[in-house]
Amino acid sequence: MKSLLTAALRIAFFLAVVALPASAQCRSVAKKQCFPQLSPYTQNGEFNSTRLAPGETAEIQMTFYAGQNYRLMVCAEGVLGDVNFKVLDSDKKELYNSKKADSKTWDFNVTSTQQLIVAVDVPASDAPTKIIPEGCVSIIVGFKKL
Amino acid sequence: MISRFLRPVFIGFSSLLILILAAALSGCGNSGKQDSDGVTGDEKPSTPSSVKDTLAQTIFYSVPSPIETASLIQKTGVPYNKDYLNDIQNVSKYTTTGSEALNLGVYGSDLSFTSIYDQTQESMLYLKCANNLAGRLGISNAFGEETANRLDANKNNRDSLLSIISESFWTADSYLKDNERPGTSSLIIAGGWIEAVYIATKLEASSKNSEITTRIAEQKFTLENLVKMLKRYDFDPTIADIYKDLTDLKTIFDQISLVKTPSVSSTDAKTGITTIGSKSKLNITPEQLKAITEKIEILRVKITK
């Protein structure tokens, strides 16, 4: 039992030192990488961030209002490589593809308020390793009056 | 429990680590103690085991801060009325984590409206209320002294005010989500949304401004996201209660008909801004508007009393 407890304490230390700061890193990534590129738009006050591994995807459903201009951007940690995103309307019609546009920010407006889906995908890794890296991905939205 | 949003760095190691920890700690028993979200450890949603071994897809829902709604309402030109805001004296009534979170959203929304309508003195009062509740929730840096100083220094620049308040909401949201308290964050968001829609219905009733009616109808979309967001945490009694109320409200919003037309995109070569053109229209009837107004008032009274 004693050795098991020692192992548990070591693991708890690992989680405290490695895993938790990795989470807190998501705020830092969003703030350092995304926010400077958002100006002159005002960010919408919401923190949409998650940790993804190569090959994983994330989707977010968002409402965009008529009468505003929006800037949409996705920031990711370098370890994930070239993270792309698509914007789809409620009929799943593709409106924007960052890979095709070769840009990680998209400025747009809508003539009628609607729900859009932002789909983020992390490219699969070809690296021959069993250790799968994870990294933060943040979706940031800024708005300003038309 | 390690949530989808807080997985250890190396997925392959996580299952093993958790198993060993669980085995080592099982002799201590589980007290079922409540955490700061008022949620027992046992009740928190667990990451399905298959997720750890397979590629996962995360789906989440966005509800913008009330600053965006306040900005849209202010653009209609309808005058401000402080009688529609929550009384600052009420702040001492909120003593549970759930009521503190909901009313941080409410006061945050009031702060958004007072700032957008250039009511500097009242903004400072609502900021104090928000700061009080944020402190009790352990997120005092979100609406703290620095925010007050910045608001004061930028009181004549509406864009800066918008930015400072948005940043406060972002700080609160990011801190709570990063610290495994997304349930508390969702209550702040719900409180802010309820207050913003409540104020919008009051302004509509007094002005009969059709643009505000449209803005209220558009909340159909945001409410859909909010309900889906809350559903994830409805194992918490406070969230389950607000989830039920908002689901009832959603049944009224669901009756608003949406006439959809396909989207057509075009990009302005000069500005680089794409316009997603669509003639989709929401048709809200006076009866539906009345039902929404009544229901949101009941809900607002319930959370602020």
Image (spheres, rainbow, N blue to C red):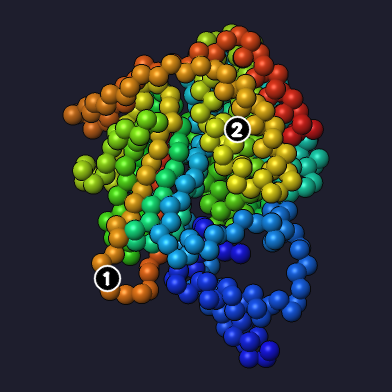
The residue drawn where x is 67% and y is 45% is B234
**Secondary structure beneath disc 2?**
helix
* Outermost residue toward the bottom in this view: A3
Pointer 2 residue: B193
Whether B126 is drawn above or below B176: the answer is above
| Callout 2 amino acid | Trp
The verdict on a common chain for dots 2 and 1 is no
Residue A35: x, y in percent?
39, 48
Question: Pointer 1 indicates a residue of which chain?
Answer: A
Q: Of discs 2 and 1, which sits in the foreground?
A: 1
| Quadrant position of residue A103 | top left
Along the line of sight, the residue nearer the viewer: A48 or B142: A48
For the question of whether residue B115 can be seen, the reply is no
Residue B24: x, y in percent?
66, 80
The residue drawn where x is 52% and y is 10% is B210
Pointer 1 residue: A127
Question: Pointer 2 indicates a residue of which chain?
Answer: B
For the question of whether residue B237 can be seen, the reply is yes
Mark 2 residue crowding within 10 angstroms, few (<14) / some (14–19) / many (20+): many
**Secondary structure beneath disc 1?**
loop
